[in-house]
Amino acid sequence: MIITVGNTKGGVGKTTIAVNIAIARAIIGKDVWLIDGDRQHTAQTAISIRSESGVEPGISCASYPDGNTLRAQVKQQVGKFDDIIIDAGGRDSTALRAALVLSDIILVPFQPRSYDVWALEDIASLIDEARSVRDGLKAYAVLNCADPGTKSTDNEEAAAAVADVPQFEYLPTPLRRRKAYSNAAGQGLSVLEYKPRDNKANDELKALISILF
Amino acid sequence: MSIVRPKKNAEAFISGAPDSATPSERPKFVKKGKKVQITLTIALPLLERVDDLAGRLSLSRAAVINLAIHQGMERGINVDGKYGVM
């Protein structure tokens, strides 16, 4: 399975989610390859920190900000891994486009804020273009940094706004704004590994992954 | 009758991204209004002579460099005995 966590808008939590998914899959024994398609190399840095700390399981991670290189490498290596997780975007880029050509699923995180909702149109048009060159690309939108509590009006409105962008299927498995995500990410960890354990964050991540795989 | 949609090319899609140009394909200047801005490396003694001339002629450094280039293009320049003119 190849999953891209991507959005043309930056700051939506792509890297945090990509790292969390990759580690969660590795924990259950999958051969995982995390690809950092962002020129800021944040995912690569997080995995380097993880590696230097000696945390197991180790995660294979490569950085391919150039789309043609990313595409060539993934096509060559795809048979060697159970899961390939690509962190791409922050802007329209060759890496994001290559990822859209290769992936089974594009997971688009967005926050329950106006700017994020407006930006869904941008990535949606890119998904349309990708679908014109290939078949079978599933596109899911998921709330990240959702407001705490189950009765947030902003969360509900943001979720409803996805219905206006027919390219996406909305996943009812939001990740809420919790310190555990950012604290874990800074140490190259998934929330599943982070101590003190945040049970709610654990449940949210597991719910998201259960839909994706 | 089934509708067949023509397939576009994946390479064309990928290279359509704003960051697709390789460094050699990118223009080696930045647009600044009607002119363009370039990067020029110059020896310090030559720059001091340019600045000295600019001071005596009450011109800016950029004006002297542009005039020198312009006049050199009109009159031609000598490189190792080879004479070139625009």
Image (spheres, rainbow, N blue to C red):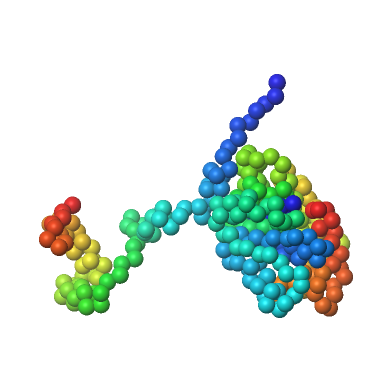
Q: Residue at x 81, y 53 (%)?
A: A213
Please state if B30 lies on the left or on the right of A81 as rendered. left
Please state if A94 lies on the left or on the right of B72 as rendered. right
Q: How many marks?
A: 0
Q: Quadrant of residue A77 in the image? A: bottom right
Q: Residue at x 72, y 77 (%)?
A: A54
Visible residue check, residue B71: no
Give whichever of A102, A114 is nearer the camera. A102
Give whichever of A146, A32 is nearer the camera. A32
Give whichever of A56, A160 is nearer the camera. A56
Residue B67's x, y, as percent?
19, 63
Q: Residue at x 51, y 55 (%)?
A: B19
Residue A185's x, y, as percent?
72, 71
Residue A64's x, y, as percent?
58, 59
Residue B58's x, y, as percent?
19, 72
Q: Residue at x 25, y 71 (%)?
A: B61
In the displayed image of the protein, which residue is found farthest to the front?
A80
Please state if A165 lies on the left or on the right of A40 as rendered. right
In the displayed image of the protein, which residue is found farthest to the top?
B1
Give whichever of A112, A130 is nearer the camera. A130
Visible residue check, residue A209: yes
Q: Quadrant of residue B73 in the image? A: bottom left
Relative to A127, does residue B77 appear above or below in the rendering? below
